[in-house]
Image (cartoon, coloured by chain):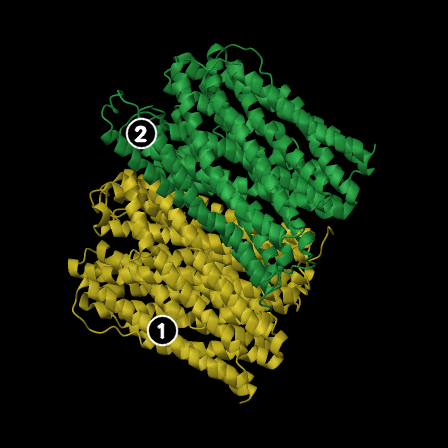
Chain colours: A yellow, B green
Amino acid sequence: MNATAIIGFVFSAAVIGLLFVVFLIRRIMLNDEGNDSVREITGAIRSGARVFLQREYRILAIFTVLMVIVLSLLVEPRPWSGVAYLFGTIMSALAGFIGMAIATRANGRTTVAAARNWHEGLKVAFSAGGVMGFSVVSLGLLGVALTVFVTGNHYLALSFAFGSSAVALFLRVGGGIFTKCADVGADLVGKVEHSIPEDDPRNAAVIADNVGDNVGDIAGMGSDLYESYVSSIAAAIVLGVAALGARDGVLLPLALAAAGILVSMVGALLVRPKHREDNFEQQVEGAQKSMNFGVFAANGIMIVVSFFIVRWMMGSLEVFWALLVGMFAGVGISATTEYYTSAAYKPTQNIARASTGGPALTIMQGFALSMISIVPPVIMIVVASLVAYAATGLLGIAMAALGLLVNLGVTLSMDCYGPISDNAAGIAEMAGLDHRVRERCEALDAVGNTTAALGKGFSIGSAALASLAWIATYFETAGIEVANLMYIEVMAGTLIGGMLPFLFSALAIGGVGRGAGDVVEEVRRQFREIPGLMEGNARPDYERCVDIATKRALREMIIPGMLVILVPLALGYTLGPKAVAGLLVGALITGFMLATMMSNAGGAWDNAKKFVESGEVGGKNSEAHRATVVGDTVGDPFKDTAGPSLNILVKLVGKVAVIFAAGFTALIVF
Amino acid sequence: MNATAIIGFVFSAAVIGLLFVVFLIRRIMLNDEGNDSVREITGAIRSGARVFLQREYRILAIFTVLMVIVLSLLVEPRPWSGVAYLFGTIMSALAGFIGMAIATRANGRTTVAAARNWHEGLKVAFSAGGVMGFSVVSLGLLGVALTVFVTGNHYLALSFAFGSSAVALFLRVGGGIFTKCADVGADLVGKVEHSIPEDDPRNAAVIADNVGDNVGDIAGMGSDLYESYVSSIAAAIVLGVAALGARDGVLLPLALAAAGILVSMVGALLVRPKHREDNFEQQVEGAQKSMNFGVFAANGIMIVVSFFIVRWMMGSLEVFWALLVGMFAGVGISATTEYYTSAAYKPTQNIARASTGGPALTIMQGFALSMISIVPPVIMIVVASLVAYAATGLLGIAMAALGLLVNLGVTLSMDCYGPISDNAAGIAEMAGLDHRVRERCEALDAVGNTTAALGKGFSIGSAALASLAWIATYFETAGIEVANLMYIEVMAGTLIGGMLPFLFSALAIGGVGRGAGDVVEEVRRQFREIPGLMEGNARPDYERCVDIATKRALREMIIPGMLVILVPLALGYTLGPKAVAGLLVGALITGFMLATMMSNAGGAWDNAKKFVESGEVGGKNSEAHRATVVGDTVGDPFKDTAGPSLNILVKLVGKVAVIFAAGFTALIVF
């Protein structure tokens, strides 16, 4: 088949993916919005999320204009690198906007549908996850393909990917700070000071808390994986052209990604929970099984499909092995994440048991566990990259990253299902719906917790492989022949790079602390100044809390964001391109490991608390329960702010390095 | 002057250092041992420490025999590498034995002397610190010099240094686990279950706790710094011969180290607190000032002395700049450690203030702070190694490490003063001495806490520079021309190396958890089974607790110890020498940063608790106090077990790599 046919296939797949998104949106919107109470709550969440997104996008717009000017003036090919960057930002922002707009329309509808029948609820929530999932892959593929074919310059795929990373920075880091300011702030005043339950509508920060789930876990995760996805395709194209020539180097990654969209659609359509007896355990099991089936089916089909695509386009199988090992790494990392964070397994149960000795042991045990939990992912990434490299050189690493992400459509649908069902359960609580509905929503939410945890492991693994691919791309584009560890500037670079994730995490966690303080003050003020609020006769000013958390999130993002961009530049223009190579490796090592450690610690503490609440080790209100609550609170900014933000850091330093590589020169020569 | 004169100077300095040790021992032993009660307690501590040391040395002996056989058979020059290794082990073990034997004889004498006069107490404790300090440097220098001059093979200095690292592994890692098993175990039963005060003689683990201070903080720190010291000298010799030729390469580092011993003696003799009015603040201030004066004077003199030695031996100043920058890095790292961990500064005070919101905020704030606290040390190490390298290449890095450690005699005296005065305060408490004596001992102890914290920062900084020097040595001895980051095996090595410190810390912290559990059970059993114990009519079986903690420490050391030795070997014999180069860099990055983070977190939590206990933020028994107690407990294994153990890991992987470098081959070639 000729190149035109393949190009046609690529664009068709992207368009079919977008049509699928339209189909899913229709399916969701046909559902009932619910009674006044549900509508009021979802309206508040929706408008809060919109306010956050508008505010973020406004600052992002200013940032983008600056970057476009810089790139258009300084980076070859001028001004196209700036244009491609702009296009990358727009497409990623659009995916985030669509995904979140629908998520905030689907949460209440999930509640209402679950009131009819639990598997109807699952269908709505999973469809909304699918809107994010398929928007991301379709707009991502479409964007890369348009960039490459319209300009005829495959290097511009890198600028396009760079554009998406700014969105990821704003939504993942900003969103991560926002969500935990609201969450911690709401809990500190509500649960601790006034002893009112979680999700109580009298708490002024409760809507902000629900907005946070959408902002951090849906838009944030979506933009993070969008970036990993387009980065992997772009890296595969650049390294592919170097290894396979201009035609196949461009077409093969795009064809694989296109096939992935179609296969993911099949997988998503296969998620069909069976009608079953309506009890909690069976619902959880049924929901989990149906989703697992969809993802496994998609992976199985994709293995066969990619085997034939590679053999047919290449005539040999080297690239296929790299893809395959990437897919396995993705599944393997998700599985070990589940092992280390789920209450069904020993590690988390051990934290719960240690908690009978007080919070210090909860923390200590959680730390020891999360430090060990980095071992399997590290080994899997090492093995995957060794095998992929052995199969087909540096290109293999990019292909492994692409293999991990090729089914992102269905995987991300499942990841985003989690926070939507979480929201649905919160709405059922706030609207005071009947016990049975709440139980059903909680069953959906329980599955969602697992899928969200898997999603975190998956996003870290993909960030690690994607940034390895970009390090390889950096060597290619910077024209570095040798970045010898013996060179002192390389060594200095690794130390500085290794330091960045620690500093970045500290700033993010500190930002959450400061922001939560602001929210606490505001909630207290409202209880004090709004007459009748505590008695339930007045409505709190939800918008103000959203506003405060949004402002804080934007403000606290500035320094870490600047660091990620300016430190590689500063190093590149003083110690030269080899020091930057060291920096990328250093940042990958500590960033990947700290991210895994913090995400898993947070996940395990969260589930240890739930394990105790389920009646084990003393149950609710026991000494052990209080200890696990401390662990859960510590873990919150770990798993929802600092951990995921490190994904962005690790990828972004690589992008800055690649894009500005041509200008790096050593001011000081050793 | 000719070589013979310089060699004579080196041996004279080492001998003078040993005579100084004899002088100090005499000065200590002339002091009164105290009344029966004090003698009984110190006797129990002394015999406990002896039991621990005997047990450790017995296992160490078996390990040493194995290693000597392996080295004698496999590593060139055979069998001399095995012999030098054995000699290194013996000299280090001897320094540890002397230092600890005197420390456990000086603690009670410090109490008694302080009863007379606080500055007499300081003199005894500081003299005992000096016994460790000058034993370490004198035996270290003597050992390296004998090895090099007797065999005529300067490479054997490396085997000698390798021998010292086994002792460090056993005393620092084993001692670190021991001390926290005893400490946490004693607290959990004593303070929590029976509400009896710390250091209460009815608690069966109380002697083990005091033994732990000697074992972990004196013998452990001594052996750790002994290893850094001889490693720096050995690296400077090997890199010096490569850069300066056989004569100067060997003589210059030895001459500088010899001068350092004499200068340190002057510094130690200048520690003369003035007679002052006898109140707490003045005592603390006086003690601190007198020690600072000694250390600063030694550094000042050493700068002048090394300037002349280098100029006179080399005719140029390159090496001097490297030494100077190392000295500054040492002082700078100590200063920032103090800033981040002392209650006199904002960071620790902020932890105390955050604690009013409960333990979760204590932990979160402590984490954020400790993650930021790695930034200044990393930058200082980076700048120091860049400047040193610019001055005189790879040799410069070894010289910077030597510069940092050249005044180890007086620095280590000050570091070891801390745990001795801590012990003295504990003895005053246990023996029920009068209020005034206890207050004086506490003043000595307060200073000791600061010096011990500085010592931790110093030991981490020295470990980082020493292992950088060994990485340089590895490149030299392995004959690696290029360890390109682009090589996939180098990348894989960095990831695996980066993973090791996480795994190692987790195992160490887990070991403390398990060991503390054993101690708890034993203390409970004794309270249950020994009639009249609770009423103070019977004596608990202290030895059993020492025995249990010793066994546990030895058992929990096995896996981490094996990991450090076997992983570099496994990598070297499969992926080859370049992968090992990656491993060393990866381990240095995460090991250095995690060690700094954990030590500073532990130190800051400890001092935040003391800050609250001093009456700030609510004072003793407030909500904030309970929260800081949680922080302090979490921090204990961080700062006293995992953190310091990472120093050993970082240095030991480098040693294994250097010694076995010649045999490394890539089984799998990419």
| Rendered location of residue A292, percent (x, y) | 32, 70
| Rendered location of residue A572, percent (x, y) | 66, 55
Vertical placement of B402 versus A170: above or below? above
Question: Considering the numbered disc 1 on the image, is that residue within a helix, a strand or a loop?
Answer: helix
Residue at the bottom extreme, as displayed = A1
Instruction: Name the residue carrying label 1.
Output: A296
The amino acid sitting under disc 2 is Lys
The amino acid sitting under disc 1 is Phe
Q: Which mark is residue B316?
A: none
The residue closer to the viewer here, A271 or A167, is A271
CB within 8 Å, label 2 to label 1: no
Question: Considering the numbered disc 2 on the image, is that residue within a helix, a strand or a loop?
Answer: helix
| Rendered location of residue A489, percent (x, y) | 67, 52
Crowd around label 2: few <14 · some 14–19 · many ≥20 (10 Å): some
Mark 2 or 1, which is nearer the eye?
2
Q: Quadrant of residue A422?
A: bottom left
The residue closer to the viewer here, B79 or B214, is B79
Q: Which mark is residue B191?
A: 2
What's the distance in space between the residues labelled 2 and 1, CA to CA?
54 Å
Question: Residue at the location (51% across, 26% down)?
Answer: B101
Q: Is residue A339 visible?
A: yes
Q: Quadrant of residue A115?
A: bottom left
Q: Does residue B144 appear to the left or right of A332 in the view shown?
A: right
Which chain is home to disc 1?
A
Vertical placement of A274 versus B386: above or below? below
Q: Quadrant of residue B180?
A: top left
